[in-house]
Amino acid sequence: MALIVGLTGGIGSGKTTVAKMFEEEGIPIYIADDRAKQIMDRADVVEAVQGIFKENVKTGDVLDRKKIREIVFHDKELLNKLNSIVHPEVRKDFEQWKEENDAFPFVIKESAVLFENNLHKECDLVILVTAPEEVRVKRVMERDGVSSDNVKSIINNQMKDFDKIPLSNYVITNINKDLVKKEVKMIINDIIIKI
């Protein structure tokens, strides 16, 4: 049975880049955000999500994710309702995916909100990806074309790295790609030794 290794980090930390490095080493990666987007395209989920909003959040037969994001960013109750629909579906999807990848010594579940949603409790080990705030802000501004204030607002609404570090088995500071690749290989070897 494959170990579940959680991979997380705040916005702009480079967790997706690190996930790709693990994937290049042959480790199966489950990107929770990507799978959640696919799940939110299913007709049953579209209708369930629309049902919690007073206003229309669909464009045709699909959810308007940008509109939903803007609404729930300011309404924690609606965010919790949305999560109560999507998260159980993602959990089921992950379990099925894990069964399909059970021949591997371990799999990685990448999630931006691993700690915030207590998903770390479902993992055997956790890898935290960090980077200095100014690096994170610059990355997100370049990637998403948003303002510095916008990125800082998101960072301020996320759990702080110093709270995540004690809950993590491994911490990768993602500044230098070559060093991170070496760390990824060392972590893979360390996990395999522990199995």
Image (cartoon, rainbow, N blue to C red):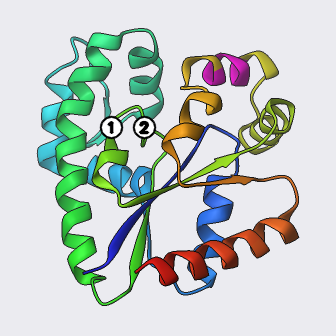
Which region of the structure is painted magenta?
A: 150-155
The chief SS type of the magenta part is helix
Q: Nearer the viewer, residue 106 or 55?
A: 106
Question: Could one spot residue 27 in this view of the protein?
Answer: no
Q: How many marks?
A: 2
74 left or right of 38 in image? right
- How far across and how far down the image is residue 144, in percent? 71, 39
Q: Which quadrant would the C terminus be assigned to in this image?
A: bottom left
Question: Could one spot residue 1 in this view of the protein?
Answer: yes
Label ID, residue 142:
none
Query: What's the residue at 34%, 50% (across, down)?
Result: 36
Q: Is residue 140 above or below residue 8?
A: above
Is residue 5 on the magenta stretch? Answer: no
Q: CA distance from mark 1 to mark 2?
A: 5 Å
61 left or right of 24 in image? left
Q: Secondary structure at mark 2?
A: loop
Q: Nearer the viewer, residue 183 or 110?
A: 183
Q: Is residue 137 above or below residue 177?
A: above
Q: Nearer the viewer, residue 188 or 64?
A: 188
- How far across and how far down the image is residue 160, in percent? 60, 26
- How far across and how far down the image is residue 183, in percent? 73, 69
Residue named by callout 1? 118
Residue named by callout 2? 115
Q: Nearer the viewer, residue 56 or 106?
A: 106
Crowd around label 1: few <14 · some 14–19 · many ≥20 (10 Å): few
Q: Which quadrant holds residue 140?
A: top right
Q: Which quadrant would the N terminus be assigned to in this image?
A: bottom left
Query: What's the residue at 56%, 18% (across, down)?
Result: 157
Three-letter amino acid code at the position of disc 2? Phe
Q: Is residue 148 above or below residue 102?
A: above
Q: Is residue 114 above or below residue 151?
A: below
Cβ atoms at labels 1 and 2 below 8 Å apart: yes
